Image (cartoon, rainbow, N blue to C red):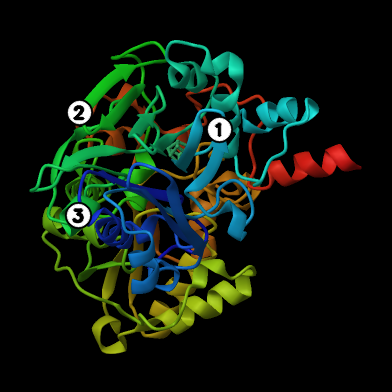
Amino acid sequence: MQKPSIRHHCGLFGIWGHQDAVALTHLGLYALQHRGQESAGIVSTAGERLMRHARLGLVNQVFDQQVLDRIRAPRAIGHVRYSTSGSTTQNNAQPLLFSFAGGQVAIAHNGNLINAALLRRNYEKVGHIFQTTSDTEVIIHLLAKPAHQGKKNPLNHVLNHLQGAYSILLLFPDRMVAARDPLGFRPLCLGETKSGATVVASETKAFDMIDAKYVRDVEPGEIVTVTDDGVESRHFGGGRGGRGAACIFEQIYFADPSSLVFGENVHLVRVAMGKKLAQEAPVEGDLVVPVPTCAQCAATGYAQASGIPYGRAFTTSHYSGRSFILPTQSGRDMAVKIKLTVIKEAVAGKRLIVVEDSVVRGTTTRGKIGALRAAGAKEIHLRVASPPIRHACYFGIDFPDPIELIANQKSVEEIRDFLGVDSLYYLSHEGMLSCVRMDRNKYCTACFSGEYPIDVKEPVEKFSMEQSQLKMFT
Ligand code: SF4
């Protein structure tokens, strides 16, 4: 179940050189649906014009067999979107498709460009007309600029203008291009099908879905070009081996547990975080329960390390709709109530160790704790498998305004009191970083630490582009 207070971002999938490329992209998007539920789209080509179908809705609502047959082609890119920049409107649904002097191009993007509003304003001042309110579109305006097209490697030049987080896929009639920003905020990996077609996806779960094998990650600052002649790689933005800023929240919450992200299996990282939490904050109890379902991996780790049995405290309804889209707290609370039912007989009279992956506003967690109390839990000890979230994210995660983050406003003891638990412990920053194998200097932890890997001069908010337009016309 999704946290109502954290919105996912986007998922990318691309495949080059397979007769069923569109059908496989469709499957790949199913595998990535957890990364975005507002819109879905595919652009495909047989080498001439690009064909697009993108709409608001879930993958199963956006595509039917007729549509898939209409855009059938051996090369395709796809996208599922949760908007962290720009409204939820049909024309913001990706992949976006454009025609410019260099021909047709489609783009799919995961991340947030922190200088997009500035770039857009500059273009609008000289008469450019934007078709969307997404930050992604500025990349195409940069690419189409004659001065940039005149460069030896136009895309290298364009990407060097961007600041922030971007994993992107571009589809031209004669090539597919995958690129990751120099700090590597968002994941992107390369794979290969049994027939030898090259695939690209945000997470390896999409490869598993189509029986493709994982080959490697697209490196931070790397551009990978796929054509009928093979795969070529080049680097931009300072080359390889520099500092990184891979989003640690991918490991904590966003990515699917079955995926390899930043070279590590997400489930195992989360289990390690649960184990670390048990070492840092042991407590006597009868049952370790995940607050369903995203904390299952961390709760497994806590139970393994503590020797306390793991069990369920809630059942989850899969038929109650999408609570995360509800705009008010009372609406979200009711949606959680509809979605989760306490198993009274499993918790009554027990000392529960409740494991959460993260606490954002705290209101939803409080509702679940209240339900456990009402069901007769004797003690409730909350263990959170990440540090307190105190700061905003400008790189593609739609956390609430910092003043709505409970840890930004209250001490741990005040949070314990607010949530109504007997004890509360958050995984330490050190403890969190000890659970990942990649060098800690390659991770972004800014929402916990406030230490941003990029100087954010003009924070991009979800509606920055709309606001920019309003400013121009008022
Ligand atoms: S601020 Fe937090 S959520 Fe945003 S990229 Fe950094 S680690 Fe991820």
Please tell me whether mark 1 sits on a helix, a strand or a loop: helix
The answer to whether residue 139 shows anywhere in this view is yes
The first of marks 3 and 1 along the sequence is 1
User: How far across and down, in percent of the image, does residue 119 sit?
Assistant: 66, 27
Q: CA distance from mark 3 to mark 2?
A: 32 Å
Please name whichever residue, 474 or 409, is drawn nearer the observer in this view of the structure.
474
Q: Residue at x 20, y 36 (%)?
A: 263
* Residue at image mark 2: 229
Please name whichever residue, 37 or 64, is drawn nearer the observer in this view of the structure.
64
Please tell me whether mark 3 sits on a helix, a strand or a loop: loop
Q: Residue at x 19, y 54 (%)?
A: 258
Q: Residue 30 falls in which quadrant of the image?
A: bottom left
Q: CA distance from mark 3 to mark 1?
A: 34 Å
Q: Which mark is residue 140?
A: 1
Q: CA distance from mark 1 to mark 2?
A: 25 Å
Three-letter code, disc 1 = Ile
Q: Measured along the vertical axis of the image, is residue 330 above or below residue 178?
A: below
Q: Which mark is residue 427?
A: none
